[in-house]
Amino acid sequence: MEKRKFKWRKWLIVLTGIVATLAIVAFIGFTWFMNKSKPMIDGELAVNILEQDVSVTRDDKGVPHIFAKTDADLYRAQGYVQAQDRLFQMDLARRQASGRLSEIIGEATINTDKHFRTFSLRDAAEKSLAAYDEESKQVLEWYAEGVNAFIVQAKENKTLSYEFSLLGYEPEEWTVVDSLTIGKYMAYDLGGNWNTLAFRHWALQNFDEEKAKELFIKYPENASSIIEANIKNPVVVAGQFNADLLPNEFNGSNNWVVSGDKTKSGTPILADDPHLGLSTPSIWYQMHLQSPQQNVSGVIFAGIPGIILGHNDDIAWGVTNVGPDVQDLYIEIPNPDNPTQYRYDGKWEQAEVRDESIKVKDGETVDFEVVVTRHGPIMTDLAFKDTEPTAQFSMQWTALQSTAELRAVIGFNKAKSWDDFEKALEDFKAPAQNFVFASKDGTIAYKANGQIPIRKQGDGQLPVPGDSSDYGWDGFISWDELPTIVNPEEGFIATANNQVVGEDYPYHITDFWAQPYRFERIKEVLVANDSITVEDMMNLQMDQHNLYAREFLPSLLTSMKAQDQDGKYAEIITMLENWDMVDAKESGAPLVFHTLMTKLQEVLFKDQMPADMYDIMHGKFNITDQLLRTAYAGGKSIWIEEQGGVDATVYKALELTIAQLEDQFGKNASKWQWGDFHQLTFNHTLGSASPILAAYFNAKKVPIGGSKVTVQAADNDLSGNVDHGASWRFVVDVGDLTSGYHIVGPGQSGHVKSDWYQDQVLDWANGDYHQTFVKQEDIKGKTLKLKAK
């Protein structure tokens, strides 16, 4: 018996040893596999496309500083270095925008591919190439040469990033159209309003006109023919569109510039923080480019040459989204006998039909056609199902025109004055952006730039008849009439996707501006300080004061008290009354307030429309604000009256709020904290595949303050994941343009084994900026010599 026990123990020890050995071997093998694709960042490396040697120093935050003797080698090196750190991201971006994800992922992304092929981003990029001059085309070619040099080397050395091995494919050659397609994707991400038109069309079909009217930010005036056309020609909308593929409605930004009259240094200070999706890797890639022709530092989208936002030796600039109505829907009437013909001025007109067959990994090719009318692509085909040839929507969009934004970027990088910069802006047409500018000569300036259409009839709030030449665009707002400010008396210029023109502005831009609270807080701080420093601007970018609560909380509390006769929610009401209206992560009141504002929308709208209509109803916050203001001012709202009045509406939302929060965080409200729900999230694409990959690739969540209405923009999904906000923070004093201050969350590198993969997560949460220098002698780090052929 003892011998049997001994043998059993012996075999157990042996088996344990074998398992441990295999685990160690597997770990070593996995580590080797992951490490072999880490980019080389020091030493010497032959790159045969270069004409002369190039130096690349990565500083302590992984920012590459590229020093080249010619622009040709500078852009080649930029392409090479971006590919070192972000090739998989670049490849995925061009595939998504081109509608080619299914080739590498399979059936799961067929609908996504249909969506982007219908939006015709790559087709627009191909057409835009003709708009570029030879110099700009050459820059694109040089950049593509650099990307391809890295791809060839990585394939030969079997050092392609691990994502390619995990998905079982290799990247194709990079082309100039790939870069332009990624640029068109950014116009898509920042220029969308077509879904709001589709929603309003549906609302007119399903609600009385007066009730539908309250769902408009501003109801169209003198547009009876347009309203009649929407009612008489119903297009199937409910059940047709996938809201998950729509750009985030809060894509926007903060920017401001302060003159030397209001700064401690006596020279202008500029700040910018674009608000986009937060992910691993970042949408932005920070770089410094220097040649005898230019010295520019800032950020760019991976896959594109140049620096789109930042500073050079003479100027600095930043952007926010204007958000104009640049996508119009047309109600198209197809020919019953030939569904690719559409009625126009009494005749049937043949549409363009593009074969967009979609290749599918491990599956059969999916036949798909994109039908393009004189106005633009038929959007109803996004239904992903066969539909009868009744009325359909087509979309006209400025970004589908031939545009040349990269030429503008090249101009920004080399501009020395406002005149130079404004001249370059003429080529930046889509997406429309609020540019702020500062130069070392003391000039501060602003321009709302881009192609903004002038309509023959209507104001862009509803689809218009597509069968008549009485509707459509009659050109664009002229360059000289775009909103522009130079050296204002106030001593500062600020934008935060707010309304940038007054009622006297002669052209329609949009009625759907962002809620005003970020802008009002920025203005409040800038007005109050005449000795502003760079540190003040960093603090303002991290400001958590909630002016949304400042406007509505007193009225909401009045409603709560009026309904809460038995004191059921006395503790919650007291918490809100004592709140300083700062969205601090340690506070419970922001958790109650923000949940309440979401529940108000659900009480008012959710049960009265299909789920997908509720999801594509962008502007719910603005509309709810509008209804509350009307009700608290003594006016009538059908939606609120249906709930029993404003007090009853608020109380219903409060009941839902407390029920949800008690379920999530327990009944002891004194222990509730905003940060327990509101948590910073930087997820990697591969993290969605499994919990194991999520734990490996995604950053650990961090409780944070702020919200979508604070200057520290931090918008969360319904689960509390903060996945949208300041994708890059930047502050610079133009009195010393030898450096600027940045945060790029979660980090510079797309490689999980890099020290710079997620090293800026806590920097993002805490507002810890890094200083990036542009003088070679000031830059410390590891240097890679790219040797010419």
Image: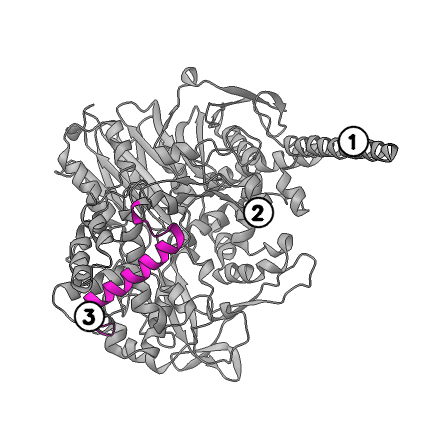
Q: From the image, tell me which residue sits under label 3.
A: 645
Residue 669 is one of the magenta-drawn residues:
yes
What's drawn in magenta, residue-wise?
641-670
Residue 516 visible: no
In terms of secondary structure, where does tag 1 sit? helix
Q: From the image, tell me which residue sits under label 2.
A: 691
Residue at 68% of width from left, 30% of height from top? 32
Residue 255: percent from left, percent from top: 28, 40
Using the numbered discs, state the Cα–Cα distance from disc 2 to disc 1 in whole angstroms. 32 Å
Label placed on residue 13: 1
Q: Counting other residues with Cα less than 10 Å from the Cα at mark 1, is it few (<14), some (14-19), or many (20 or more)? A: few
Residue 214 is one of the magenta-drawn residues:
no
Quadrant occupied by the N terminus: top right
Three-letter amino acid code at the position of disc 2: Pro
Asked if labels 1 and 2 touch by Cβ distance under 8 angstroms, the answer is no
Using the numbered discs, state the Cα–Cα distance from disc 1 to disc 3 in whole angstroms. 74 Å
Name the foreground residue: 396 vs 114.
114
Name the foreground residue: 95 vs 77.
95
